[in-house]
Amino acid sequence: MPHESRKPLTRIDPTAPLVLDTSALGRQPGSSREEHLSVPAPENFGVEMVGVPEGDPIGLDLRFEAVLEGVLVTGTAAVSLRGECSRCLDPIASDFEADFQELFVYDDTRSGGNADDEEFRLEGDLIDLEPVLRDAVVLALPLSPLCREDCPGLCADCGVRMADAEPGHRHEAADPRWAALQDLAGALAPAPPDRGDEGSRPRGSSDRREGKQEG
Ligand SMILES: [Zn+2]
Ligand SMILES: [Zn+2]
């Protein structure tokens, strides 16, 4: 019975810095080797407020082990993160290390039952480490990074960095009656001219929702 395994094997770019060649293992179960290398970070290697600038080095300590169904890759990635504190917007620079372990299955091996498409596959003798590193590093990054655990952020009234402000920095609290009056004034102010003809929309109750929908 002809069993063909002719998937197009052209997805991996052999020249990409995170594509690694495992042919030295000779597909001999039990053989292993280690590699220490530094590769340039791919683009968008981070989350919105923190990440590794494109081209900055990613230090990799890798161990490749041939097993029956593929190559097991165990490693550590070390990067220098750049970002912004989500409270005070100060620049952040810190070092970060992530461990990972992933089995790359030979492309002519059937996936054994656990047919998740999350399976990593070799293409020939090549593995693409980038998705593994993204899982290990990018997914571990904080969405709201802080310059320090207890960053006091910015003054809500004047925007000064609270860390720089004198102790007890505060503004005369607005008289709550004024606040109430301002709310009232807002509610009474003539509504901005309606776009189109939605003339019957209730005023003053739903402005918070509407103001912010730009993204
Ligand atoms: Zn901060
Ligand atoms: Zn202030």
Image (cartoon, rainbow, N blue to C red):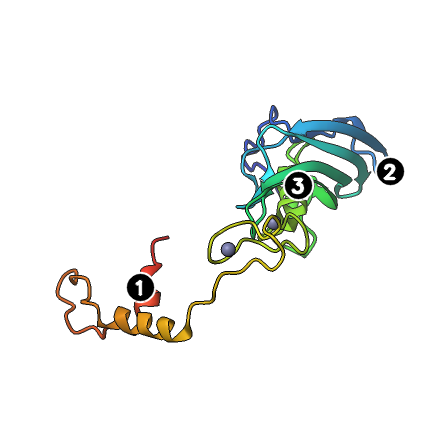
Question: Mark 2 sits on what residue?
Answer: 30
- Work out whether 194 lies above or below 163: below
Question: Mark 1 sits on what residue?
Answer: 210
Badge 3: few (under 14), some or many (20 or more) residues near its Cα, within 10 Å? Answer: many
Q: Which residue is found at the position 70% from the left and 53% from the top?
A: 112
Q: How many marks?
A: 3
Q: Which residue is found at the position 66% from the left and 43% from the top?
A: 132
Q: Which residue is found at the position 86% from the left and 34% from the top?
A: 31
Q: Give 214 or 167, whichever is nearer the viewer.
A: 167
Q: Which residue is found at the position 30% from the left and 67% from the top?
A: 207
Q: Give 24 or 102, whichever is nearer the viewer.
A: 102
Depth-wise, is mark 1 or mark 2 nearer the camera? 1
The quarter of the picture where residue 21 lies is top right
The quarter of the picture where residue 29 lies is top right
Give the image location of residue 122, x and y in percent. Answer: 67, 37
Determine the secondary structure under disc 2: loop
| Mark 3 / mark 2, whichever is N-terminal | 2
